[in-house]
Image (cartoon, grey):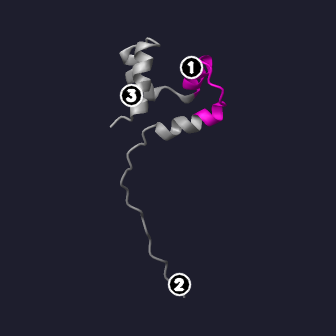
Amino acid sequence: MILREFEAEILRLYHVEHWRIGTLARYSSLRAPRLYDMVHERGHPGRPDHFRTIVARYRPRPAAEAYLRLRTLPALPLR
């Protein structure tokens, strides 16, 4: 489900900024520095490190992988 704010941003980028659909489809693959440059050109007053933190919140997380933790028994004492 897409949040209303995110949907509004997509529509704004398409209609006002004239982004192509392919660019919008790759929107999550753009790196944070490139996104920061784009919003900074449009007047965003924030700093890059703060912007990266915000972008990281909305990035999809990679799926967790199942793994088996290897446990060994303690060694027998030497006599």
Is the C terminus in the top left, top right, bottom left or bottom right quadrant?
bottom right
Direction top: furthest residue: 18
1 up-or-down from 9: above or below? below
The residue singled out by tag 1 in the image is 38
Residue depth check, mark 1 versus mark 2: number of the one nearer the observer: 1
Is residue 52 part of the magenta span, yes or no? no
Which residue occupies 42% across, 39% down?
60
x and y, in percent, of residue 22 in the image = 37, 17
Residue 77 numbered mark, or none = 2
Look at the picture and state if 76 lies above or below 20. below
- Circle 2 SS class: loop
In the picture of the structure, the residue carrying the numbered disc 3 is: 7
Residue at image position (64%, 35%) is 49
Q: Which of the pair 50/4 is nearer the observer?
A: 4
Tag shown at residue 53: none
- Mark 1 vs 2: CB contact within 8 A: no
Residue 57 at what x, y percent from top left?
A: 50, 40
For residue 68, above or below residue 29: below
Mark found first going from the N terminus, 3 or 1: 3
Cα distance in 3D space between marks 1 and 2: 65 Å
Where are the magenta residues, as a range?
A: 33-51
**How many labels sit on residues?**
3
Q: Earlier in the sequence, mark 3 or mark 2?
A: 3
Q: Residue furthest left?
A: 1
Contact between labelled residues 2 and 3, with CB atoms less than 8 Å apart: no
Q: Quadrant of residue 7?
A: top left
Rendering coords of residue 70 (x, y %): 42, 64
Give the amino acid type for the residue marked by disc 3 in the picture: Glu
At label 2, the amino acid type is Pro
- The front one of 21 and 10 is 10
Q: Is residue 34 left or right of residue 61?
A: right
